[in-house]
Image (spheres, rainbow, N blue to C red):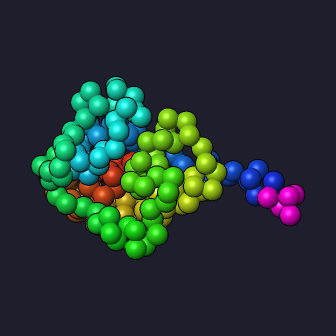
Amino acid sequence: MKKILQKEDNNLDFYKIFKPELTPKRMMELGVFGGAYFGLSLKEYPKSWFKNAKISKTFDVNLNRFKVVSGLSREHWIEKGWIFKEDPLGWFQWYCRFCNGRRIAHMDKIQIKRWKNFRRHVSAIEKNCEKGDLGCRKRQRQAILQWAYDPYR
């Protein structure tokens, strides 16, 4: 049993596929989660991330880059099993902590798989929108921005 666990732990190929296009800092500068995602302590993250970030105590759709609501409710996240005790605010909290150097192999594998699967929305934009038409599929563009994909395709 111990050898099997060690073999699984050493198989970290999933890290190689994780190539986000945007940093948390850049995402917050562009406008994500209505500016209210950080209902948590900002002290955990580098101050430089918040210099030009769009932050609000309450959700403000005007702080989103595409001025649209995009995403599902927290209740839906919980119902789907997308919230974990390590990161009770979800994927973006995990991503911020990952960028700060935290590694939890089993959590990283789950979240990287979720990030990779979200790529289908990038493909939909590329397939259905003229390059540079930022008015096309604004909700999907906001969504991919919130998953660290470049919405300016």
Residue 151 locus on image (x, y percent): 30, 50
Magenta-colored span:
1-5
> Residue 118 sits in which quadrant?
bottom left
Q: Is residue 112 above or below residue 96?
A: below
Observer-nearest of 7 and 19: 7
Give the quarter of the figure containing the N terminus.
bottom right
- Give the residue displayed 68% in from the left and 52% down from the top: 13
- Give the residue displayed 34% in from the left and 35% down from the top: 42
- Secondary structure mostly seen in the magenta stretch: helix
Residue 29 locus on image (x, y percent): 26, 37
Q: How many marks?
A: 0
Residue 55 locus on image (x, y percent): 22, 40
Residue closest to the far left: 62
- Give the residue displayed 26% in from the left and 27% down from the top: 51
Query: Residue 66, can we see it?
Result: no
Confirm whether the magenta stretch covers residue 35: no
Query: Residue 60, can we see it?
Result: yes
> Residue 23 sits in which quadrant?
top left
Q: From the viewer's perspective, is 2 left or right of 144? A: right
- Give the residue displayed 46% in from the left and 69% down from the top: 81
Residue 65 locus on image (x, y percent): 20, 47
> Residue 4 sits in which quadrant?
bottom right
Observer-nearest of 32 and 97: 97
